[in-house]
Image: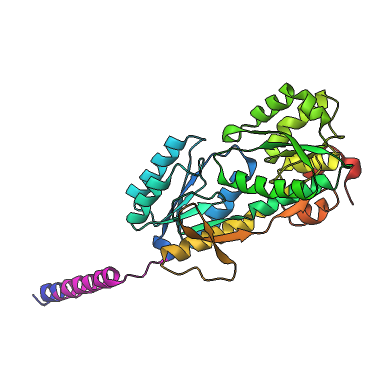
Amino acid sequence: MRRILALMLFATLLLSACNGSETLVTESSEKTEASIKIGMSFDSFVIERWQRDRDVFVSTAKELGAQVNVQSANGDVVRQREQIEYFIESGMDVIVIICIDSSSLSEVVSEARKSGIKVIAYDRLLNDSSVDLYISFDNEMVGRMMGEALCGAIDYPGSFVMLGGSPKDNNVSLLEQGFLEVCEENSIDVSGRMHADNWKAEIAAEYVYDHEDIIKSASGIMCGNDTIAGAVIPVLAEMRLAGSMSVVGQDADLEACQRIVEGTQLMTVYKPVEKLAKRAASCAIALAKGERLEAEDVQTINDGTYDVPYIAMEPISVTKDNMNEVIIGSGFHLKEDVYLNVPELMPA
């Protein structure tokens, strides 16, 4: 009998302890890192750098205890919208968007924010969406760096051809604004221009094929990114212009760095994506916890309707002169990989 009473008393105490623990958890309103869920929707992984952004963001968030669900829309706006709707239904705390079309997601972003979900526009601004944060690189500066590199490599007078990225990407207009400002400052004519829908590099290559006269009369070519440059340079080789025609790009893709040391691409713009992805991950967790983003580098940018918080990271212009210092020295690419095709030029 005593044993039965003792067991009953133990069970009562255990139940009380469990109930007390549940009450503490229920009453606590503080969001912990371990309970934070982040949904991340990428445009696609066709562009080399996005894979690095993904890996660094996910590993940083996990180190901080958050869970990340990564989706790729494969360049399909409808699919990206569906992914964001899925994140909303799944009760994500934060949604990070690398958008396909800067003007296509305002309604679904509004749904997310009405549901109490924080939204971060990663690298590409979302127009008319009032996101909680836009974090990217200074894209006008990227364009200026491209223009300055070309201007420094030509004999005056001269003209440039501008092979831009997707017109639906808000960053493209910012980059081109910076590029065209430099052209105007140096009295350089832009004799030809086009845009590669959905960043399809083959469209730029076709333009070069179809406008050989314009290309041959130009002094240099601005490519919207290194992938476009990689599609254009073989066409220039067929025209016997590779190496003599100055070509610039951005993203510091491995193949672009190889082309620079080989002499077929003049420069690229290195964006330290590790810093960007790590900062974005820490900001996502801070927003999920209800913390204000207060730092000297947090400014604002107008998305067409709203002034949204904006963090602009600084890009770096890379040529063969600082390749070893910036790219290899930072560990972004290995020396053996950069000089793979010209080992005789590899520094000791």
- Quarter of the picture holding the N terminus: bottom left
Q: Does residue 204 appear to the left or right of 75 in the view shown?
A: right
Q: Quadrant of residue 155?
A: top right
Work out whether 106 lies above or below 274.
above
| Residue 194 percent location from the top left of the image | 66, 33
| Residue 84 percent location from the top left of the image | 40, 45
Work out whether 221 lies above or below 31.
above
Considering the whole magenta stretch, tell me its main secondary structure.
Answer: helix
Residue at 84 percent of width and 39 percent of height: 158
Q: Does residue 30 appear to the left or right of 193 in the view shown?
A: left
Is residue 336 among the parts visible in the rendering? no
Is residue 274 among the parts visible in the rendering? yes
- In the depicted view, which residue is nearer to us: 32 or 156? 156
Work out whether 11 lies above or below 93.
below
Q: Which residues are magenta?
A: 9-32
Residue 27 within the segment the image draws in magenta: yes
Residue 199 within the segment the image draws in magenta: no
| Residue 318 percent location from the top left of the image | 78, 50
Residue at 60 percent of width and 35 percent of height: 199
Q: Quadrant of residue 279?
A: bottom right
Residue at 73 percent of width and 36 percent of height: 229
Q: How many numbered discs?
A: 0
- In the depicted view, which residue is nearer to us: 323 or 150? 150
| Residue 128 percent location from the top left of the image | 45, 50
From this viewpoint, which residue is outermost toward the right? 344
Q: Does residue 229 appear to the left or right of 134 in the view shown?
A: right
Query: Looking at the image, what colour scheme do you see?
Result: rainbow
Q: Does residue 107 appear to the left or right of 191 in the view shown?
A: left
